[in-house]
């Protein structure tokens, strides 16, 4: 009896033939998943809450990043975030809206009208977070491939992913504050007397802790929940197959041989 190999990540269970198909079909499926999750992140970026004390709005992107890594795995998850970053750098409006398009009176923006941003990440104060998306999705996917998305360790995997986003985003924001007179004046007007490190933490970390905790929790519940549904469906299908009576086929006819010659 050959033991069945359990899929590495969630999409391998949802699309069971993805690893045993032809190379062309497998590439087409992988490309569709990568682009699809990049577009999903673009939609998550349009769920934005404006904060007057920072240039970075609260968005649903962290949820999309963690979900992409956990569902796709390291290679496809990281690649989907890289595609998302390249889309924005190519001029497509997929990044989170900047505070100015949201308007002075508008606090919450929910997808439509589409107000996405674009630009070169190294020229954006929030560009480090976008680069961190690639690293976070890759690492979360790596942990998911080791089963962290199906055990009690899933919140730890999501927490690691969130920390990696800030590990790139915060120093990036600090460098922009230190070297951009207009940006520094903006934060000095909000936080008078604060240094670069304090402005970076107050503008790039503290306002997002509560929201990221909720998004982390949502992603941590979504993956095990999806796995539970997959296991239930597979188990139910297997039970049906075992209970199905065997098909009655025609008995093979037995050809009578010639009688032996005397």
Image: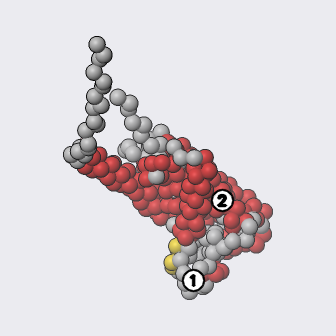
Q: Quadrant of the C terminus?
A: top left
* Residue 136 can be seen in this image: no
- Closest to the observer: 106 or 26? 26
Q: Where is residue 104 in the image (x, y as percent from the top left)?
A: 60, 85
The residue pinned by badge 1 equals: 113
Pointer 2 local density, CA inside 10 Å: few below 14, some 14–19, many at least 20:
some
Pointer 1 local density, CA inside 10 Å: few below 14, some 14–19, many at least 20:
few
Label annotation for residue 166: none
- Closest to the observer: 38 or 181? 38
Point out the frontmost of discs 2 and 1.
2
Q: Which residue lies furthest to the top in this view?
A: 262
Q: Residue furthest front?
A: 262
SS at mark 1 in the image: loop
- Closest to the observer: 119 or 43? 43
Q: Where is residue 102 in the image (x, y as percent from the top left)?
A: 60, 81
Determine the CA span between mark 2 and mark 1: 23 Å
Residue depicted at x 56% and y 86%: 105
SS at mark 2 in the image: helix
Colour mapping used in the image? secondary structure
Q: Where is residue 28 in the image (x, y as percent from the top left)?
A: 60, 55
Q: Where is residue 177 in the image (x, y as percent from the top left)?
A: 72, 64
Residue depicted at x 47% and y 39%: 146
As drawn, is 129 to the left or to the right of 91?
Answer: left
The residue pinned by badge 2 equals: 83
> Dividing the picture into quarters, in which one does residue 226 lie?
bottom left
């Amino acid at each position: 009896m050959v033991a069945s190999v359990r899929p590495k990540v969630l999409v391998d269970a949802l699309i069971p033939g993805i690893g045993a198909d032809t190379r062309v079909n497998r590439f087409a499926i992988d490309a569709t998943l990568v682009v699809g999750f990049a577009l999903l992140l673009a939609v998550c970026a349009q769920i934005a809450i404006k904060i007057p004390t920072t240039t970075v709005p609260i968005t649903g992107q962290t949820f999309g990043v963690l979900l992409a890594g956990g569902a796709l795995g390291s290679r496809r998850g990281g690649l989907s975030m890289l595609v998302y970053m390249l889309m924005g750098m190519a001029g497509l409006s997929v990044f989170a809206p900047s505070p100015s398009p949201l308007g002075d009176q508008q606090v919450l923006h929910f997808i439509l009208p589409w107000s996405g941003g674009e630009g070169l990440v190294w020229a954006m104060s929030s560009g480090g977070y976008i680069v961190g998306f690639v690293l976070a999705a890759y690492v979360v996917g790596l942990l998911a491939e080791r089963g962290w998305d199906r055990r009690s360790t899933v919140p730890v995997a999501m927490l690691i992913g969130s920390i990696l986003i800030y590990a790139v985003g915060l120093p990036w924001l600090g460098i922009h504050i230190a070297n951009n007179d207009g940006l520094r004046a903006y934060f000095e007007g909000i936080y008078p007397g604060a240094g670069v490190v304090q402005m970076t933490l107050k503008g790039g970390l503290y306002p997002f802790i509560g929201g990221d905790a909720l998004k982390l929790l949502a992603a941590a519940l979504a993956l095990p929940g999806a796995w539970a549904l997959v296991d239930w469906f597979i188990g139910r299908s297997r039970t049906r197959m075992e209970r199905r009576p065997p098909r009655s086929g025609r008995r093979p006819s037995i050809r009578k041989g010639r009688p032996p010659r005397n």
